[in-house]
């Protein structure tokens, strides 16, 4: 059974408690000053945490070799999305063996829950969740990302190549 | 003397806008992300956001999590009691559009924060990473003090 | 009447029916591609294999006619493997097109794979390549690789429209569906081939890539393209109506529907519709005022109507009826005006020349769905010729305008005649540049938004229900009558 | 030994023309038949037990019996579309004895009271077509055809119709739709041709050899015909023997004649340096027999079906030990893939699949599981289509794979041919 130690007369003045607390803090301060590199705080704007490729961040619409969108507007991602935040309008492509392509591909990022189901649903690896973390924005800005924001935004450097390649699929006779 | 007072006035006004005293309604999983942003690893105090002990002393309201009737009540009351001008950051899809738990029933649409109080910055994500929350803080500060932030000024100076 | 037992359930069917029809009556599902109730039997897809008790080999249900006391099984192991392999043979040369194929979601290959297949495919050889996007005519696109050569469309053009446009050329697995040189598939029933095509080989150009099928909801209705009154199913979602498909009704349209009827959904969508009240009065300098609330407008019209009747008598008010409204609307509007003593009712036909023409299958010259209903509800309708003579003295005219302006060929002349009257109240569903000079334009509900009954040219009354609301402010004539009643009664 | 009932005078040149044919006893059966009543002729053929020589072996008398008794006009078609690989007996009969066929057809037409008959000759047989056409003109001039034949009051028209080179048209209903000008694709059965055939009228389709045997039966009576062959398959049959034998050709032997004697006596045994490995008894669509089965086999319908094969149209293909079975299967699969009419899905897609599978096995690109897959596909094609082409394509595959599996596996393991190191199958694309 634990014995409760009554505070002694001396500590009633709180001076010793305050001093020990202050001592601990000062000790930490000097310790940190000397071991700068052990501090694990990530100073956000300058230092960035390196995310792995599997991180489910902002969407990327992959492109084919000739730079056009890999997406064939099959609406599977829009069907599978639990938050129903993807809206696609399809159109007929003039090249007969590319029959269908999206004119507009919009993701309402405010509704999106970044679950990655669209990435799983896509049969041709046209949409991926990139390593770059979600971007906050002021109230007035445009939260419905369209094709050039999803596929051709500056830091994607002209678009990310999709794994599924048409010529190779045709060669295998699919 | 009035010149000095004027300069002092400018500095105080600038700092006043620079520092936010945040009052949190950290519901749901986004609450934990806010905690990450607040504590050691990301530490938003570096950006000048301090913890207010009472809503009346706070000028930044951060809301996250699913808005049910009780939380809606709390948001409205807190918002009224905070000192104006209040900036509001809504974090996470639950607060912004209620999409994760939306039943798409036209008769019972989800209650969202923007339907209760005017929101300045939205942070999409479910939950958004702490960097996104810090990005929101920076966006808010760039909105409050237009022009290059002191951070950019400092970098400019360091560079040349 | 021979009796047949299928999987234990017995049914008596008229002599000569096939086993597959008997199974359908017992709603026992039998997989089939080439069999279609409205067409002849081809027996080419070999999916509808069933086991008949005394016969060693599996029989094709579509071609085996029922004999008395026949016992048929559709769920034995032998039948299951036969159907699975018949489906497998259909799928080995099938292209991997589901992402870009319109039929995905209602494709029979998908459905039957889920109920009869669910096997891991063993086909590892290269597939047969054929032509992909082949335009067969103005309305239909063919994809020869998806075509499973069930010859339903060929039999349709041979037996129903008797125009023989489609044929299967070449032999073996090089055979392709195609049209003859210089004879595209352009008859007025070409899109029926798209409906009966069980796969995505034939797709309609009008619906191509517009919307995925599982985003659409459907409701049953009656086509208001002409007075045949074909039963249709309308597919819609919150953005509007996307397509119209026929529904089986043996005494009206069988399984089919004409192509011009498939365009009726176009004018019900928002971009063609009149969404607000348009008022044009001298006080406002003659230009149009839009957006007045409908109830308010109706009250004003009721007041003006009663004043005109009080000062100039009931003879100065005329009504022009087009045959595009429901019986209920005619009776309520008719009764309202008869109580006020108005009796100048004129019938506005869409075109005098081929009003009674009939193209032999379904399409009739009378492009109004309810002409017969109009004649039944309102006796003593004067013709358009009398209206032209008596129009000038009329103070106020109510025009029950047509929903589908395309149906009225000589619309400009009719509008010129109507303009002669001083005040015109025009109930119209669609916006049109011709209706600029009229005093009142009231947005009317299109047939997809209201329920009622149409009486087709054969005198068969067919009720239908509203499916969706596209223009919230639009009113049906019954609502218009309710709106005008109080103010009209108060004054008189 | 050979029993030449039909082919007695085939080597004489004048037998081809009308005078020579009549001199050697021709058209005597016709005179005799015209005096008899039609029912007697049908009964005579029925008692003789004559079975169809085209491939199915269906008793001819019974087939004629299916005709409805009403007075509807009916047609007699002669199926001279000899598409089965390995069979060339019809061609020989038409070149050497056209009148034998014409006389048989007139007697048969008289038996089934038909006013009109056609000879549907295979497109590639241009020479026999010419000969038969001339023979028909001679018959017309001699009053054996046309109105009031030989004063008996029976009039009959006969025409020759050339096919367009499709194997499928050998099938009864496909022949009828081709004759009607439609695409040569089999029709749904029922209704059978005997009830509703050519131009929706009752129609009888018989092979050349079947009709050519009718005059002999009328002359010598049913019992005379039964003396040869066995109780169930009486009479004689022309076998077209091909392969590396010393004297390949057409031999008329009584049914139930053992293959060993046919090979040793008539065909003079195998060529030197070749040893018998396998036998396809009745044309390419019949399952193959290996060496010991072939030695025990007797050439009649019952024994063949016991052995698991068919007598078919009597196209005996002798396979020697220098022949690679995989290469032979490739050839057969390519033939059936090319000839499938494409109406029913199992056969249209199945033949294509089997050809690709067997050529990939031959080229060594395949795995062992592909052999079982090839066998499974073949078994699933059996009996699922309107006509028997899918069975004809599947039977060789099942028999080849089950009896000569080692050669198929050798092609996959060693990527070489077991029999001759490198064979044509490997160079297949």
Image (cartoon, coloured by chain):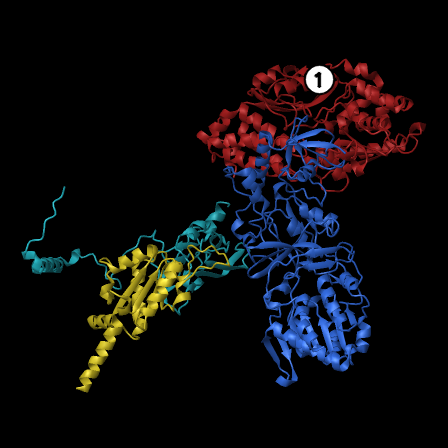
**Image point (29%, 74%), residue name:** B145
Query: Does residue C326 appear in the picture of this structure?
Result: no
Q: Position of residue D217 (x, y in %)?
A: 81, 19
Q: Secondary structure at mark 1?
A: loop
Instruction: Name the foreground residue: C338 vs D28.
Output: C338
What's the colour of chain C in the image? Answer: blue
Determine if residue B116 is in view.
yes
- Chain in red in the render: D
Instruction: Point out the image quarter for the N terminus of chain D.
Output: top right
Image point (50%, 26%), residue name: D407
Chain colored yellow: B
> Residue shown at 74%/39% (left/top)?
D178
Residue nearest the viewer, comparing C484 with D63:
C484
Out of D120 and C269, give the one closest to the viewer.
C269
Residue A40 in the image: state x and y as whole percent.
20, 56
Residue wearing tag 1: D255
Q: Is residue C288 above or below residue C410?
A: below
* Chain letter, colour cyan in render: A
Spot occupied by residue B126 in the image (x, y as percentages of width and height): 37, 56
């Amino acid at each position: 059974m634990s014995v409760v130690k009554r505070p002694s007369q001396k500590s009633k003045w709180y001076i010793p408690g305050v001093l020990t607390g202050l001592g601990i803090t000062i000790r930490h301060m000097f310790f940190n000053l000397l071991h700068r590199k052990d501090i694990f705080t990530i100073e956000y704007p300058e230092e960035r945490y390196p995310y792995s490729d599997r991180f489910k961040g902002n969407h990327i619409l992959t492109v084919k070799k000739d730079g056009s969108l890999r997406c064939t507007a099959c609406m599977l991602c829009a069907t599978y999305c639990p938050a129903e935040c993807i809206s696609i309008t399809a159109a007929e492509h003039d090249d007969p063996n590319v029959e269908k392509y999206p004119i507009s591909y919009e993701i309402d990022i405010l509704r999106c829950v970044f679950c990655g189901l669209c990435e799983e649903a896509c049969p041709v690896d046209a949409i991926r969740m990139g390593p770059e973390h979600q971007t906050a924005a002021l109230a007035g800005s445009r939260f419905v990302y369209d094709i050039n924001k999803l596929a051709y935004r500056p830091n994607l450097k002209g678009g990310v190549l999709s794994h599924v390649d048409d010529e190779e699929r045709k060669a295998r006779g699919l | 003397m009035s010149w000095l007072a004027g300069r002092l006035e400018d500095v105080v006004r600038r700092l006043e806008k620079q520092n936010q005293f945040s009052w949190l309604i950290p519901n749901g999983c986004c609450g934990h992300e806010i905690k990450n942003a607040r504590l050691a690893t990301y530490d938003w105090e570096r950006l000048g956001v301090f913890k207010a002990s009472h809503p009346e002393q706070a000028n930044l309201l951060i809301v996250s999590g699913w808005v049910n009737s009780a939380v809606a009540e709390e948001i409205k009351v807190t918002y009224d009691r905070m000192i104006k001008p209040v900036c509001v950051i809504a974090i996470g899809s639950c607060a912004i559009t209620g999409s994760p738990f939306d039943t798409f029933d036209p008769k019972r649409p989800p209650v969202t924060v923007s339907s209760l109080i005017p929101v300045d910055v939205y942070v999409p994500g479910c939950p958004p990473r702490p960097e996104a929350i810090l990005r929101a803080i920076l966006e808010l500060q760039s909105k409050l003090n237009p022009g290059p932030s002191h951070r950019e000024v400092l970098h400019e100076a360091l560079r040349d | 009447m021979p009796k047949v037992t299928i999987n234990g359930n017995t049914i008596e069917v008229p002599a000569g029916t096939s086993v597959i029809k008997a199974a359908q009556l017992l709603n026992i599902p039998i997989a089939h591609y080439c069999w279609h109730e409205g067409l002849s039997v081809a027996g080419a897809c070999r999916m509808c294999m069933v086991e008949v008790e005394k016969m060693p080999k599996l029989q094709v249900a579509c071609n085996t006619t029922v004999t008395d006391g026949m016992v048929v099984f559709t769920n034995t192991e032998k039948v299951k493997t036969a159907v699975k392999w018949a489906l497998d043979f259909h799928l080995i040369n099938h292209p991997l097109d589901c992402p870009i194929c319109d039929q995905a979601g209602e494709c029979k290959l998908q459905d039957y794979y889920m109920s009869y297949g669910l096997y891991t495919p063993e086909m590892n050889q290269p597939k047969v390549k054929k032509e992909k996007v082949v335009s067969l005519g103005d309305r239909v696109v063919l994809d020869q690789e998806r075509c499973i050569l069930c010859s339903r469309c060929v039999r349709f053009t041979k037996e129903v429209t008797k125009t023989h446009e489609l044929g299967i050329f070449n032999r073996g697995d090089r055979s392709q569906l195609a049209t003859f040189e210089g004879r595209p598939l352009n008859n007025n029933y070409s899109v029926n081939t798209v409906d009966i095509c069980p796969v995505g080989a034939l797709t309609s150009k009008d619906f191509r890539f517009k919307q995925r099928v599982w985003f659409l909801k459907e409701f049953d209705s009656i086509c208001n393209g002409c007075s045949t009154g074909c039963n249709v199913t309308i597919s819609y979602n919150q953005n509007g109506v996307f397509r119209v498909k026929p529904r089986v009704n043996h005494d009206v349209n069988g399984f089919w529907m004409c192509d011009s009827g498939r365009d009726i959904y176009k004018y019900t969508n928002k971009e063609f519709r009149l969404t607000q009240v348009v008022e044009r009065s001298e006080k406002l300098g003659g230009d149009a005022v839009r957006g007045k609330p409908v109830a308010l407008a109706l009250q004003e019209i009721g007041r003006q109507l009663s004043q005109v009747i009080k000062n100039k008598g009931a003879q100065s008010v005329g009504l022009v009826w087009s045959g595009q409204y429901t019986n209920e609307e005619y009776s309520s509007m008719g009764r309202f005006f008869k109580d006020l003593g108005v009796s100048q009712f004129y019938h506005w036909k869409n075109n005098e020349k081929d009003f009674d023409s009939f193209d032999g299958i379904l399409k009739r010259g009378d492009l109004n769905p309810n002409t017969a209903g109009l004649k039944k509800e309102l006796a003593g309708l004067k013709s358009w010729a009398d209206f032209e003579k008596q129009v000038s003295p009329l103070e106020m005219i109510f025009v029950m305008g047509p929903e589908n302006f395309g149906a009225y060929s000589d619309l400009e002349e009719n509008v010129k005649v109507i303009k002669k009257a001083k005040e015109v109240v025009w109930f119209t569903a669609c916006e049109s540049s011709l209706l600029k000079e009229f005093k009142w334009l009231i947005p009317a509900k299109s047939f997809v938004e209201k329920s009622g009954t149409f009486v087709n040219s054969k005198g068969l009354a067919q009720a239908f229900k509203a499916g969706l609301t596209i223009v919230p402010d639009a009113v049906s004539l019954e609502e218009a009558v309710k709106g005008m009643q109080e103010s009209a009664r108060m004054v008189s | 030994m050979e029993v030449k009932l039909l082919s007695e005078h085939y080597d004489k040149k004048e037998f081809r023309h009308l005078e020579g044919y009549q001199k050697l006893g021709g058209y005597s059966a016709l005179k005799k038949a015209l005096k008899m009543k039609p029912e007697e002729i049908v009964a005579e053929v029925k008692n003789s037990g004559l079975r169809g020589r085209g491939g199915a072996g269906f008793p001819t008398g019974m087939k004629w019996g299916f005709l409805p008794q009403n007075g509807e006009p009916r047609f007699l078609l002669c199926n001279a579309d000899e598409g089965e690989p390995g069979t060339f007996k019809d061609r020989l009969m038409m070149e050497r004895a056209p009148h034998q066929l014409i006389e048989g057809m007139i007697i048969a037409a008289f038996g089934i009271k038909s006013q009109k008959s056609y000879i549907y000759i295979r497109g590639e047989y241009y020479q026999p077509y010419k000969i038969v056409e001339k023979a028909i003109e001679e018959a017309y001039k001699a009053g054996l055809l046309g109105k009031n034949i030989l004063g008996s009051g029976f009039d009959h028209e006969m025409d020759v119709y050339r096919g367009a080179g499709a194997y499928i048209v050998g099938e009864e209903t496909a022949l009828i739709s081709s004759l009607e000008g439609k695409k040569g694709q089999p029709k749904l059965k029922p209704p059978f041709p005997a009830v509703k055939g050519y131009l929706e009228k009752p129609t009888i389709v018989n092979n050349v050899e079947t009709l050519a045997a009718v005059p002999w039966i009328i002359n010598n009576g049913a019992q005379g015909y039964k003396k040869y062959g066995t109780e169930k398959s009486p009479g004689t049959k022309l076998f077209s023997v091909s392969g590396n034998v010393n004297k390949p050709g057409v031999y008329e032997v009584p049914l139930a004649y053992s293959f060993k004697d046919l090979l040793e006596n008539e065909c003079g045994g195998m060529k030197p340096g070749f040893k018998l490995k396998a036998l396809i008894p009745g044309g390419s669509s019949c399952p193959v027999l290996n060496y010991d089965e072939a030695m025990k086999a007797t050439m009649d319908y019952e024994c063949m079906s016991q052995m698991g094969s068919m007598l078919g149209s009597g196209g005996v293909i002798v396979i020697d030990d220098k022949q690679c079975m995989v290469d032979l299967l490739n050839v057969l699969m390519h033939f059936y893939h090319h000839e499938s009419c494409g109406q029913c899905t199992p056969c249209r897609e199945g033949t294509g699949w089997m050809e690709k599978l067997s050529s990939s096995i031959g080229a060594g690109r395949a795995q062992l599981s592909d052999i079982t897959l090839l066998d499974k596909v073949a078994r699933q094609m059996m009996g699922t289509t309107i006509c028997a082409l899918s069975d004809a394509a599947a039977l060789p595959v099942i028999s080849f794979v089950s009896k000569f599996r080692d050669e198929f596996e050798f092609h996959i393991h060693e990527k070489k041919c077991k029999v001759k190191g490198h064979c044509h199958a490997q160079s297949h694309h």
